[in-house]
């Protein structure tokens, strides 16, 4: 094995260790139930990527499919827009029936008075999650199912055990890492419940329900990373940076699929397609293929992103090797700017001025 190959393997493991330490620091401090559900896909992504790198499966057979489905949810809206349409409507229908069944009297079930979507907000008024999105990526058919609590406990236990095992295994051969945090914990304090089947204060009335839901789910993903996850760490934390990259990339791809659908079907004339074109143009300078592959997977061997001369730089010189003349910090600024551009576009699909929040 050449010296460069050895270094590539070592850096692959070191990044895995950094991610494990970052996740472990959250597992120790975060007790908010909304945060715990919202962050699960990114914990599961870590478990999946580690197992992929090691070529082994350490999960109980009963949980393999759940973890695979949750991991795949990160990129689900980047598939064909017609498929995303069907998916958001299917989840909406399931949740609609779920909440309707909670009404005590049968005659109330035909009156369309139930609230079938809950949304979660920061103290400063940013929407960062919703119940239909959570039900979708956690593969929940009914949030009132008494077996759900035990299923979530087992999932949390498997994630925690896996992260602890990786930390302990790598600490025997690699130096200990200190994860710097800006905040010790987060609390999500506000919510707003609506009925997606009737006029409400959240959805735009000029576009169909499924498009409102599509934009809402994308916005919740982006805002959770920007306003909840990212502020917990100092800027430059590798795990937080990689999650922002992955979420922004797949959100951009989802918008691209939607744009293509509009152009091919001449639908949704009221939607600003030019804004998506501008986002895509900006994304071309940020999402470079060589970098994207190593952001999604741990194996950097023969990936062409490591050079001996740059390994002492932040993020092991990967940015400098992929983007000539750009530093890690410069790239983070570019990624933040693109993320903000996407968020602004999605926020403009809604009118949040009349939304009345309640305290959880």
Image (cartoon, helix red, strand yellow):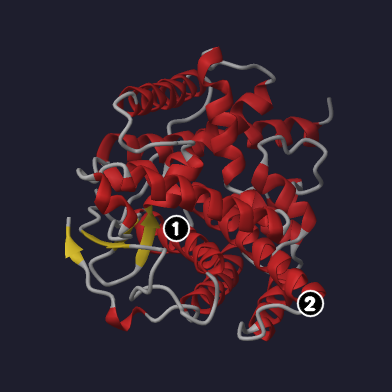
- What mark, if any, has residue 36 been given in the picture? none
Image x and y of residue 352, in percent: 35, 78
Where residue 172 appears, as percent x and y from the top left, is 48, 18
From the viewer's side, name the closer residue of 235 and 335.
335
Q: Which residue is mark 1?
A: 225
Counting other residues with Cα less than 10 Å from the Cα at mark 2, is it few (<14), some (14-19), or many (20 or more)?
few
Question: Which structural element holds mark 2?
Answer: helix
Pick the quarter of the image with the N terminus: top right
Residue, disc 2:
263
Quarter-wise, where is residue 46 in the image?
Answer: top right
Q: Is residue 260 left or right of residue 126?
A: right
User: Splitting the image into 4 quarters, where does residue 328 fall?
Assistant: bottom right
Task: Please indicate, yes or no, whether residue 78 appears anywhere in the rendered image.
Answer: yes
Position above or below: 64 against 242 = above
Work out which quarter of the rendered image holds the C terminus and state it: bottom left
Drawn side of residue 291 relative to residue 225, left or right? right
Q: Nearer the viewer, residue 49 or 126?
A: 126
User: What is the secondary structure assignment of the residue under circle 1?
Assistant: helix
- The one nearer the camera, 302 or 60, is 60
Q: Earlier in the sequence, mark 1 or mark 2?
A: 1
| Left or right of 189 in this view: 215 | right
250 over 136 or under it: above or below: below
Q: Residue at x 33, y 30 (%)?
A: 145
């Amino acid at each position: 094995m050449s010296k460069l190959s050895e270094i590539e393997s070592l850096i692959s493991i070191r990044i895995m260790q950094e991610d494990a330490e970052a996740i472990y620091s959250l597992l120790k401090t975060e007790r908010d139930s909304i945060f715990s559900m919202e962050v699960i896909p990114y914990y599961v992504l870590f478990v999946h990527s580690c197992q992929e790198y090691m070529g082994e499966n350490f999960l109980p057979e009963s949980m393999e499919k759940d973890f695979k489905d949750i991991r795949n949810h990160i990129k689900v809206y980047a598939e064909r827009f017609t498929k995303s349409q069907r998916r958001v409507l299917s989840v909406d229908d399931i949740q609609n029936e779920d909440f309707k069944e909670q009404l005590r009297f049968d005659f109330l079930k035909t009156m369309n008075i139930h609230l079938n979507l809950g949304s979660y907000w920061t103290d400063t008024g940013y929407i960062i999650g919703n119940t239909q999105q959570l039900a979708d990526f956690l593969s929940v058919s009914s949030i009132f199912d008494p077996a759900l609590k035990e299923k979530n406990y087992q999932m949390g236990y498997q994630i925690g055990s896996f992260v602890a095992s990786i930390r302990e295994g790598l600490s025997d051969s690699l130096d200990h890492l200190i994860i710097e945090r800006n905040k010790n914990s987060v609390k999500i304090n506000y919510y707003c419940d609506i009925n997606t089947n009737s006029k409400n204060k959240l959805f735009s009335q000029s576009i169909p329900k499924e498009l409102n839901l599509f934009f809402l789910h994308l916005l919740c993903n982006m805002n959770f990373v920007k306003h909840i996850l990212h502020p917990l760490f100092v800027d430059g934390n590798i795990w937080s940076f990689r999650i922002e990259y992955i979420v922004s990339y797949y959100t951009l791809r989802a918008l691209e699929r939607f744009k293509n659908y509009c152009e091919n079907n001449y639908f949704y004339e009221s939607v600003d397609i030019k804004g998506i074109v501008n986002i895509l143009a900006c994304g071309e300078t940020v999402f470079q293929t060589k970098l994207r592959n190593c952001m999604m997977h741990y194996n950097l061997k023969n990936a062409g992103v490591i050079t001996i001369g740059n390994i002492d730089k932040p993020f092991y010189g990967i940015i400098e090797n992929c983007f000539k003349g750009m530093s890690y910090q410069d790239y983070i600024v570019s990624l933040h700017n693109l993320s903000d551009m996407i968020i602004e576009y999605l926020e403009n699909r809604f009118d949040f001025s009349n939304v009345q929040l309640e305290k959880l």
